[in-house]
Image (spheres, helix red, strand yellow):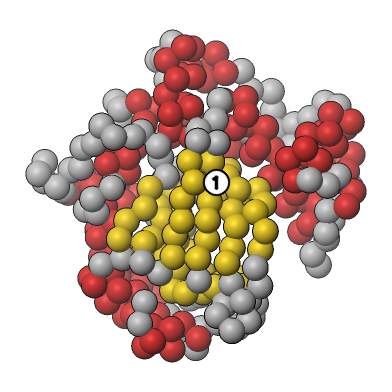
Amino acid sequence: MNNKILEQADKLIEREGLTSTFIDGVNIYKVSTFKERCPLTYPICLIVLLQGKKVGYLPNKKFEYDKSNYLVVPIALPFECETFASADEPLIGLSFNIDKNMMLDIISSLSKEELKESSDTKMALFQGVVSDEIEDIIYRLLKILQSKEESKILGQTILKELYYRIATGENAHFLHKMFLEQKQESKISRSLKKIHDNFNTSIDVASLAKQEDMSVASYHRHFKEITSYSPIQYIKKIRLNKAKELIESKNFQVNDTAYEVGYISVSQFSRDFKSYFGYPPKEAKVFN
C-alpha cells in the first residue's frame, strides 16, 4: 500500500483497536504492539492490511497476510493469530463482513470462464494478491468513508466493485463453490451456520450430516478438509471463543458462561478454557 492510502486511513482512525465506519460491516483498526499467538474466531470476512503483518495458524496450515496479499475467510473459522506491529510501524487494516447476498449476486453473474476451479485444496480460507485495481478501490473507499453522505450513496457500489475483484481472483474457487447449492463446500457452509446459530445447544453430528444428505463419514471428511477441524473440535472452539467474549465484554461469571455456551460441567469448561487460551476463565481480562 502506498503512502496516500495510509494518509487517508489515518483520517479515519479514532483510537487503538477497532473503529467503525459509516458503512455497516466495514471497520478500520490499528494495533501498535506485538501480539503473541492467541486463539480467535474470524467471522465471514475479508481482511486487507494497509501496514504490518499477521501470521495465522491452523492445525495443518500456516499463512501470512500483509499489505501485499488480502485474506478471505468465507466461513466463520477459529484459528490462532500472531500480530507484528510496533509504535513506529503499527498494524493498520480494514475488515469487511462479507455481504453474502451481494457476493451471491456477483458470483451468479460471472461467466463460466470466470468461475474458478481448482483441485489443489478444499481449504475454505484463502489469500490473493492486492492488485493495482484493488489498491485503487481501497483508496477511493477510504476517501468516501470520511463522509456519511458519500458512504451512504456510493459505499455499496464501491464494495460491489471490491467483491467482484475478490470473486475473480486466482484463488477464489472455494468462494464460488460455497455459493453453488449442490457442492459439498456449500453443504458444509450451511451446516456451519447451523452450528453458529445453535452452538449453546446439544449438537448431534449425525443429524447435521443427515440434514445435508451426506453420510457421516463423508461429512466428517469434507468438514475437516474445509475447516482443518473435526466437527467436535470446531464446535468446542466456537463455544470457547464465545465464552471468552462473554467474560471480557459482558463481565459474565464463570459458572454462567459455561452454561451459556452449552457446557453441562463447569469444571470441564474451565479445563477446556485453560487448555485453549493458556489461563483459566477466572483470569480472563474484563474490558468495560
**Residue at (50, 86) in percent of width and height:** 10
Residue tagged 1: 57
For the N terminus, the image quarter is bottom left
**Residue at (67, 58) in percent of width and height:** 36
Q: Is residue 234 left or right of residue 175?
A: right
Residue type at numbered disc 1? Tyr
Does the rendering let one see residue 245? yes
Q: Quadrant of residue 20?
A: bottom right
- Within 10 Å of the Cα at label 1, are there few (<14), some (14-19), or many (20+) other Cα atoms? some
Q: Is residue 205 left or right of residue 221?
A: right
Secondary-structure class at tag 1: strand
**Residue at (24, 72) in percent of width and height:** 132
Q: Quadrant of residue 272?
A: top right
Does the rendering let one see residue 157? no
For the C terminus, the image quarter is bottom right
Above or below, 12 relative to 97: below
Q: Quadrant of residue 112?
A: top left
